Amino acid sequence: MEDSQDIGLPLNGLPDEARKDSVSEASQHSQTASDFIDSQLQLEADAREALPYKFEHCTQPLGPLRQNLFSCLTCNPSPASPSDPFTPAAVCYSCSIACHGEHTLVELFNRRNFTCDCGTTRLPSTSPCTLRIDPTTGMKGPIHSQTPAEGNTYNQNSQNRFCGCGEFYNAEEEKGTMYQCLGLTSEKDRGCGEDWWHPECVVGLGRNWTKAQAQIKQERNAVINGADDADADHPLPPGFPDENSFDTFICHKCVDVNPWIKQYAGTAGFLPPVYLSESDGTAKRSREQDEEAQRRLAEYSAAQAEVTEELREAKPTSNGTNGNDMLEDDAPKQEAFLQPVASSDANSKKRKADDATLDSSESSDSKKNKTISRYHDYLPELPTGSFSMFLKEDFRERFCRCPSCYPKLSKYPQLLEEEESYEPPISESGEEGGQSVGTASLLDRGEAALSNVDRVRAIEGVMVYNHLKDKVKSFLQPFAESGQAVGAEDIKAYFEKLRGDEQGIQAAAVSRGNGGGDRGDNRREQSGY
């Protein structure tokens, strides 16, 4: 029998070239320990970015909130037609992960005054809430078939339909930017209920306009670059303002239901109206009317400034205060308007006393015009036609708050002050008991698990872990020094040696080869693809 070295066969029975190819192939499908750790850390960072908040508690016990909501299409599938029967529902951030994590969800983003529907009759009992405390058992979930909150309002977004065009939203295919209406009126009251709008639909051009523009740009790029540009930009339609020029907007539906707000279009804090169609554009105010309105507003501001200065210079009153004190204590903080919302009898008497300190030679008519002027008297004429309004950052400071205007304004808190949205606590890396799935490292989760067992078992576990760690370290040390990649076969062989069961592993391999890939229970191991 010839020596195996003479015929070029190594001890494992493979030719040298085949062994080189095998090592090369193994290297391509393996990684160093450092690379593996880096990839795990990156995966954990990505998980924290995708799911930044804890999802331990449902927000239902907190009552109505402005919060981020999701509609579950698995539990409540969208009907084929908007007119078909449909029970809308929305769940909070935590329930979207803990109770509906494997379902198809539509993100509705922030909605005001909403109580989570998870665990109520608006969702099937097969999808209970697992985060709330069951009052009968005193433990978390499963809870279902509870009565939903009465104050919740819904719109077509729960059916995955958006905008005035009612188009189904596809996050993978949607291009361009959509804008959320401030939402003055619910959908059932002929408003939009904080819907999201396409720019082209706001100006009445419709979706076909943007699709046509994208097609034109793709064809032009194909001619210039010789390739199709699938990510062609979607330009803003004519008449739609630059996105940096406004803070939020109110759609034409909500404006039409609240026509009193139309007078503010084009004044300080508001951009000019954006009409829905050309026919509405024929009803625009003339340039002469706009110039007259601006002149009247400037006259109003000058009159208010004059009254302010006179009050500041007024002589001290009988109770020891002067006009400047009155401005600071009694005058409403409305900047350009200085118009009270309401006043008590005592304040009314004090104002009358302060007014009496003004120069007595001034005519009563002139004094009256300066002290009771109302901002809305100087606004432009009420425009006609259907249009959307675009609001600047300081628009809330520009509303008239006189006794006749304030009741209409006070119906909408979002017009009086900026809203705050509820956010769950941040899920921090390594925080015991509070991390999201995949947001803590294996070491962190191991330490957390050890903290929940008795002291003796914990110590034994740590000793076994340290022993295994030293063994693995000695195994990895040569690879680290040489820079060689650690292959799957190397790790498998090492742990076989640790267990002392090489023969058992080989026997199992032969059995697998004879029995095929099935495990005997109609399941197959995942191939990784």
Image (cartoon, helix red, strand yellow):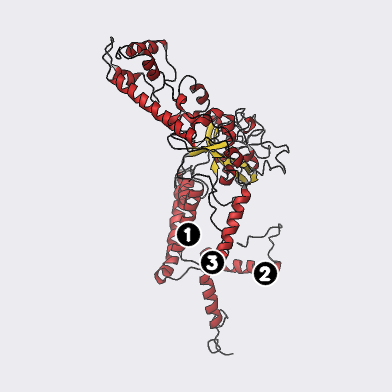
Q: Which of marks 1 and 3 is nearer the N terminus?
A: 1
Q: How many numbered tags mark residues here?
A: 3
Crowding near the residue tagged with mark 3, few <14, some 14–19, many ≥20 C-alpha atoms within 10 Å: few
- Taking depth in this image into account, of 365 and 91 the one nearest to the observer is 365
What label sits on residue 39 in the rendered view? 1
Q: What residue type is labelled 1?
A: Ser
- Taking depth in this image into account, of 280 and 402 the one nearest to the observer is 280
Q: Is residue 261 above or below residue 4?
A: above
Q: Which of marks 3 and 2 is nearer the N terminus?
A: 3
Query: What is the quadrant of residue 360 in the picture?
Result: top left
* Drawn side of residue 289 relative to residue 115, left or right: left
Does residue 481 appear anywhere in the picture?
yes
Q: Return the x and y of residue 191 as percentages of the image width and height.
A: 60, 33
What label sits on residue 224 in the rendered view? 3
Q: Return the x and y of residue 347 as percentages of the image width and height.
A: 38, 13
* Drawn side of residue 264 relative to residue 90, left or right: left
Q: Is residue 230 above or below residue 408?
A: below
SS of the residue at dot 2?
Answer: helix
Q: Which amino acid does label 2 sit on?
A: Gly
